[in-house]
Amino acid sequence: MLTRLTKNLTYISRIFSQNFGIILLSLLLSNMYQLSAQNEQDEAFDQNIVSSGESLFKGNCTVCHAINEVVIGPALRDVHERQSEEWIYAFIKNSQKVIKSGDEYAVDLYNQYNQTLMTSFDFSDEELNSILTYIKSESAKEVQVAVVDNIVEGGEVSSSISSDNFYLSLGLNIFLLLLLIFILFRFTNLSKKYVILKDNQNKGKLLDDDDKEIVDSGFKINEFIKSNKVVGIASFVFIAVFVKSCIDGLYTIGIQQNYQPTQPIAFSHKIHAGQYEIDCNYCHTGVNISKSANIPAVNICMNCHGVINTDKPEIQKILTAYEENRPIEWVRVHNLPDLAYFNHSQHVAVGGIECNTCHGPIEEMDVVYQYSELTMGWCINCHRESEINSKGNDYYDKLVELHKSSSKEPLKVEDIGGLECSKCHY
Ligand code: HEC
Ligand code: HEC
Ligand code: HEC
Ligand code: HEC
Ligand code: HEC
Ligand code: HEC
């Protein structure tokens, strides 16, 4: 009876150790399957619509709205569950009309937000649909940062959650597997010891030769580690991780995204552009009229800091610079290589693109960092996706009309030569 148990246990242990690789692999696959099933769920939205909605949203709405937090207007997460599509479209087109019609929800909301006027937008139904699709797709994502005291901090939504989960559950599975194997081997060994003891007590009569062979053959940890399968799997994993980190490393060469140098004076956009709502154009005087946005000279700071907070150490630095008639040596954050040509007025004044689209939530930054990649692919992608802005521009109006009569696609920057090398390269 006991010998049979020991025999079976030994077999099971052997099967486990011989097929350890396969078990590991199937665990990995089943985890990946779960992950991809999850991703499919995330991607149930048409990516083209979502991305055009995203650029419309970032260009027009992020000044006042975020998905997960109150900015000037309400957080738009799950707004489609609060109101019907028709209502939302009507509100975006002309919120005042909806409010004046006496719609109870709209009036309450309006009062709740201190009767702040929301801008009216002259969007087509298609554009409205894409914006709402974008909002829906963002709402479907989980919020990464937990709700702290009822304030959604950061409100960043990350797609890395699912891959974190992936590693977590994979780790857990492997741990359980190892535990199981450990218990199994302990059990096998104990029962073997017991059988041998009994055999000795019976002066070797209990076990025949076959049995003895099985009881003697054991699982040897050294052989296991040195076996081809284990060495193979270990080196595969090692090489895969190594190659992945090399590739990741190569992709980031020359990209300065998130670069955030320390500035000589602790100037905060959060205070100036956010809290006091000073227009970007007040300091960056070039954005609408020239290639360069300009960094403000000391004089501009002195307009206010000649009188505001003159006793603070950081402001003292401005005063000293002013008295000594020398510029403040700000550290440049954004810097394209000399071979590329980028023009602010072309994008801001003509194209009607908001600063936030390229520079991110500057109004919330205490210290400015580079929000976008600033790679050639980044410029090109946006030129492929963005429609050109023809409002109040006779030349473009004609061009847009001509284009409309010949094709159904809206006129994109790409169609007016936005992908030609010489437009961006000297
Ligand atoms: C100038 C700031 C501003 C801009 C720009 C703005 N909104 Fe609003 N939005 C508001 C405010 C404020 C409210 C709250 C109602 C009110 O005060 O009129 C609001 C309310 C809404 C609501 C209703 C929210 C709810 O909880 O029911 C929706 C939907 C909405 N905005 C969508 C948009 C979209 C889409 C855009 C971009 C195309 C946009 N808004 C641009 C300020 C703005
Ligand atoms: C009161 C003046 C002032 C206002 C208003 C202001 N800025 Fe600035 N900005 C500065 C100064 C000074 C710097 C240089 C120091 C730094 O990088 O923080 C700067 C730097 C920047 C930079 C980084 C420049 C670089 O080195 O590449 C960007 C981008 C920028 N501002 C965007 C904006 C936007 C967008 C707004 C409006 C929402 C704005 N700024 C409003 C003064 C201002
Ligand atoms: C339009 C007026 C205005 C201009 C222009 C302006 N500031 Fe300010 N600044 C303010 C106000 C208002 C505060 C906040 C004062 C407070 O809340 O104590 C402030 C605060 C600051 C502070 C924080 C002071 C502290 O320690 O509390 C610094 C640093 C600063 N500004 C630097 C600058 C620099 C550098 C410039 C020029 C690029 C500049 N400011 C231009 C209005 C201005
Ligand atoms: C289409 C994208 C885009 C938009 C929109 C945009 N910027 Fe920029 N910005 C850039 C790029 C790219 C650079 C780097 C330019 C370079 O190195 O030649 C830059 C650089 C800057 C700088 C550093 C000084 C300079 O001119 O090189 C400031 C300040 C700045 N931007 C402010 C603004 C402000 C304020 C707005 C909105 C009124 C704005 N930007 C809108 C892409 C953009
Ligand atoms: C957020 C979208 C966006 C990004 C990012 C962007 N652009 Fe543009 N760009 C536009 C739009 C929109 C226009 C068309 C403006 C118009 O004339 O109506 C344009 C026009 C241009 C033009 C003129 C094209 C022509 O045929 O007249 C040049 C040159 C250009 N961009 C260079 C760049 C460079 C260089 C970068 C990257 C550093 C860049 N752009 C990044 C949206 C973008
Ligand atoms: C919309 C603007 C735009 C267009 C169109 C464009 N480029 Fe670029 N290109 C850039 C920017 C911006 C950079 C710098 C990117 C960086 O620093 O990562 C760049 C970088 C490059 C570089 C890399 C240089 C280096 O030092 O690494 C090459 C090569 C290049 N471009 C070739 C081309 C060719 C060929 C075309 C035409 C098929 C073209 N570009 C069209 C904006 C553009």
Image: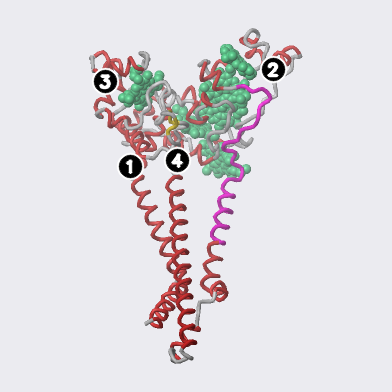
Q: Is residue 11 above or below residue 210?
A: above
Percent position of residue 28, x then y: 43, 60
Mark 2, residue position:
313
Mark 4, residue position:
158
Mark 3, residue position:
105
Q: Are marks 4 and 1 in contact (CB under 8 Å)?
A: no
Q: Residues within 10 Å of mark 3 (few under 14, many from 20)?
A: few
Q: CA distance from mark 3 to mark 4?
A: 31 Å
In the rendered view of the protein, which quadrant contains the N terminus? bottom left
Q: Earlier in the sequence, mark 2 or mark 1?
A: 1
- The segment highlighted magenta reads 238-267
Q: CA distance from mark 2 to mark 3?
A: 49 Å
Percent position of residue 97, x then y: 27, 15
Q: Are marks 2 and 1 in contact (CB under 8 Å)?
A: no
Percent position of residue 401, x then y: 34, 28
Q: Earlier in the sequence, mark 3 or mark 1?
A: 1
Which residue is found at the position 45% from the left and 31% from the top? 148
Mark 1, residue position:
45
Disc 3 within 8 angstroms of ligand 1 (CB): yes
Q: Earlier in the sequence, mark 3 or mark 4?
A: 3
Q: CA distance from mark 2 to mark 4?
A: 39 Å
In the rendered view of the protein, which quadrant contains the C terminus? top right
Disc 1 within 8 angstroms of ligand 1 (CB): no
Q: Secondary structure at mark 4?
A: loop
Q: Is residue 108 above or below residue 66?
A: above
Pick whichever, 267 or 406, lies toward us: 267
Q: Is residue 306 above or below residue 425?
A: above
Q: CA distance from mark 3 to mark 1?
A: 28 Å
Q: Going by the image, does 121 lie left or right of 163?
A: left
Pick whichever, 123 or 169, lies toward us: 169
Under mark 1, the amino acid is Phe
Q: Secondary structure at mark 2?
A: helix
